[in-house]
Image (spheres, rainbow, N blue to C red):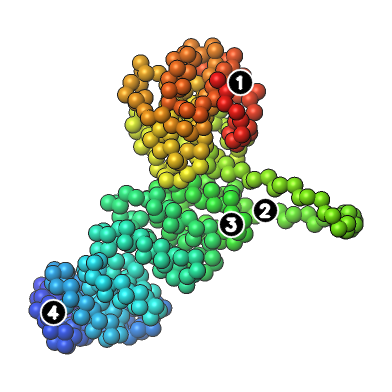
C-alpha cells in the first residue's frame, strides 16, 4: 500500500464523485481506488475485520472517510440516485462497499418510503458486526435528528416483546441517540429501555452493557433509579443474574450503587416433610378454605424524600426513611430553587405513581412539582412545608390539585408558622389531611410516633381537617 498522500486522495475522491450519476462508471473507479490503497501488511480478513465473513480490500478507514465526504452533498441533494448507488454498492458484497452503502442511506431523507425497507432487509441479511452497526447508526442519522418520533417508533418495533431476534438491533440503534447532546427527551428512552433491561436475556449481555453504560453517562441518577427499581420489583431471576455478570463493566460508582442488590440471595430453606404431610392432610376436605388475599408488594423505589434547604441525604429523617423503606430514593439537592427543581425532574422523569415526601424547603419543591405534574404523583406528604407566600411569592401561584396530600405540622414550629401553611394548603389541595402534632419544625418526636407505613401506603384513610 502506498503512503496516503491527502492531496492525491482528495483528487481521487473528487474524481470518483463526478461519476455519482453513472453507477457503473462509479463502481469501476471505486474498485480502482480501493485496490490502489490495499494494505498488504494485513494478511487476512480477520486482521481487518474480526468476525466478518465479507471479502475486503483491506482499505484504511481514511480512504472511505474521504470518499464519504465527497459524496455527502450529492447524496443529500439527489436521494433517488443515492438509493440506486447504495443498492449497487451493497450488491458488490465487499466490506468497504457495504459500509459506503450504509453511509449513503444515512444521507437520504427519512420521508423516503424506500429507506426503511432497505435497512430492515439488509440488517436481516448481514452477519458482519461492523456493517450491522453502521446500518443501525450511520444509516439512521437523518431520521434520528430530523424525525425523532419516527425513529423511536422504529426502535419500539425492533424491541417488540414478540420479536426477540431484533432486540439487539433496537438496543444498538438507541445508543447514538442517547449520546446526542442535542436530544433532550431521555425519559422516552428510559421508557423504551426498561422492559428490555428487565427481561435481561443472556444473549444480549454485550448490548445491555453498552446500553446501561451509555445511559449512565447521559443521566446517572435516572439510570441508577431505573436499575434499582427493576432489581427490587422484578420476579425474573435472570435479571439479577445477567446484571451480576455484566456489572464489572459498569463505571465504579454505578457498581457501588448496585452492589447490595446484586449479591446472590440465599436459597429458601425447604419445608420439612412432616409439615408438608400435615398440610396435605388438612387440605383433603372438598371445601377448601378461601385463600387469604396476597399482600401487595411495596414498591419503595417510587418513594422519594426531598430534604430541606440546609439539609442533605444524610440527615436524620433521610436516613430513618431509608432504613424503614429500603430502596426509596433520597437524593441530594443544591443551589437555588430553580437549580434544585432542575435536579429533581430528571430523577422523576415521566414515571407515574410517585409518593413524594417533602420536608420544609423540600415540601415547597414537592408542592410545585405536584401542581405542575399531578398525573405523576400518587401521594404527597409534606413535613412542615415552606408554603409561605411572603417568602416565595409567585412560586406558589399554583393551580389546585386533587392529589391525595398529607401535611404534618408542629404547633411549636417557629421557622414555618402553622396557620399560614394550613390556609394556603386548603386552597391548593382538594384532598387534604392536615395532621397537627405537638412538636417543632424538625418534627423529631413526631417522626418516632407516626405510623409511616400507613401514611405512605394506606390509600383508604378518610379526610382529616
| Secondary structure beneath label 1 | helix
| Secondary structure beneath label 4 | loop
Q: Is residue 189 left or right of residue 328?
A: left
Note whether 198 is above or below 308 in the view shown.
Answer: below
Separation (CA) of disc 4 from disc 3: 52 Å
Q: Is residue 385 left or right of residue 134?
A: right
Separation (CA) of disc 1 from disc 2: 36 Å
| Residue at the disc numbered 1 | 446
At a point 75% along the width and 47% down the height, the residue shown is 292
| Residue at the disc numbered 4 | 20
The mark found on residue 161 in the picture is: none
Q: Earlier in the sequence, mark 4 or mark 3?
A: 4
The mark found on residue 240 in the picture is: 3
Note whether 125 is above or below 387 in the view shown.
Answer: below
Q: Earlier in the sequence, mark 2 or mark 4?
A: 4
| Residue at the disc numbered 2 | 265
The percent position of residue 180, horizontal first and vertical second, equals: 30, 55
Amino acid at each position: 500500500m502506498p503512503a496516503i498522500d491527502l492531496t492525491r486522495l482528495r483528487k481521487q475522491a473528487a474524481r470518483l464523485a463526478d461519476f455519482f450519476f453513472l453507477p457503473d462508471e462509479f463502481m469501476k473507479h471505486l474498485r480502482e481506488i480501493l485496490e490502489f490503497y490495499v494494505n498488504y501488511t494485513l494478511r487476512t480478513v480477520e486482521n481487518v475485520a474480526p468476525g466478518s465473513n465479507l471479502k475486503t480490500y483491506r482499505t484504511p478507514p481514511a480512504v472511505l472517510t474521504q470518499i464519504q465526504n465527497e459524496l455527502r452533498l450529492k447524496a443529500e441533494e439527489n436521494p433517488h440516485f443515492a438509493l440506486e448507488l447504495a443498492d449497487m454498492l451493497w450488491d458488490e458484497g465487499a466490506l468497504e462497499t457495504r459500509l459506503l452503502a450504509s453511509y449513503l442511506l444515512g444521507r437520504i431523507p427519512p420521508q423516503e418510503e424506500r429507506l426503511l425497507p432497505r435497512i430492515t432487509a439488509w440488517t436481516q441479511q448481514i452477519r458482519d458486526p461492523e456493517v450491522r452497526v453502521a446500518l443501525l447508526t450511520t444509516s439512521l442519522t437523518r431520521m434520528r435528528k430530523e424525525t425523532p418520533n419516527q425513529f423511536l417508533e422504529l426502535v419500539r418495533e425492533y424491541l417488540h416483546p414478540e420479536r426477540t431476534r431484533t432486540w439487539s438491533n433496537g438496543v444498538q440503534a438507541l445508543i447514538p441517540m442517547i449520546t446526542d447532546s442535542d436530544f433532550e427527551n431521555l425519559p422516552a428512552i428510559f421508557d423504551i429501555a426498561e422492559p428490555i433491561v428487565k427481561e435481561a436475556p443472556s444473549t444480549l449481555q454485550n448490548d445491555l452493557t453498552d446500553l446501561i453504560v451509555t445511559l449512565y453517562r447521559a443521566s446517572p441518577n435516572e439510570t441508577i433509579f431505573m436499575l434499582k427499581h427493576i432489581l427490587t420489583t422484578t420476579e425474573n431471576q435472570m435479571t439479577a443474574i445477567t446484571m451480576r455478570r455484566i456489572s464489572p463493566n459498569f463505571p465504579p460508582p454505578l457498581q457501588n450503587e448496585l452492589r447490595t442488590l446484586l449479591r446472590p440471595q440465599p436459597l429458601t430453606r425447604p419445608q420439612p416433610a412432616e409439615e408438608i404431610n400435615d398440610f396435605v392432610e388438612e387440605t383433603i376436605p372438598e371445601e377448601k378454605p378461601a385463600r387469604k388475599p396476597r399482600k401487595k408488594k411495596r414498591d419503595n423505589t417510587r418513594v422519594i424524600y426531598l430534604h430541606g434547604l440546609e439539609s442533605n441525604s444524610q440527615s436524620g429523617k433521610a436516613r430513618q426513611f431509608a432504613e424503614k423503606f429500603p430502596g426509596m430514593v433520597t437524593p441530594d439537592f443544591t443551589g437555588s430553587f430553580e437549580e434544585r427543581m432542575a435536579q429533581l425532574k430528571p430523577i422523576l422523569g415521566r414515571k407515574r405513581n410517585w409518593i413524594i415526601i417533602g420536608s420544609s424547603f423540600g415540601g415547597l419543591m414537592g408542592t410545585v412539582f405536584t401542581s405542575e405534574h399531578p398525573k405523576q404523583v400518587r401521594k404527597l406528604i409534606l413535613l412542615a412545608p415552606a408554603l409561605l407566600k411572603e417568602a416565595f411569592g409567585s412560586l406558589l401561584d399554583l393551580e389546585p390539585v386533587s392529589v391525595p396530600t398529607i401535611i404534618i405540622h408542629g404547633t411549636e414550629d417557629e421557622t414555618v408558622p402553622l396557620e399560614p401553611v394550613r390556609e394556603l394548603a386548603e386552597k391548593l389541595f382538594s384532598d387534604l389531611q392536615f395532621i397537627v402534632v405537638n412538636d417543632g419544625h424538625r418534627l423529631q418526636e413526631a417522626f418516632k410516633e407516626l405510623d409511616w407505613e400507613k401514611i405512605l401506603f394506606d390509600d383508604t384513610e378518610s379526610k382529616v381537617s
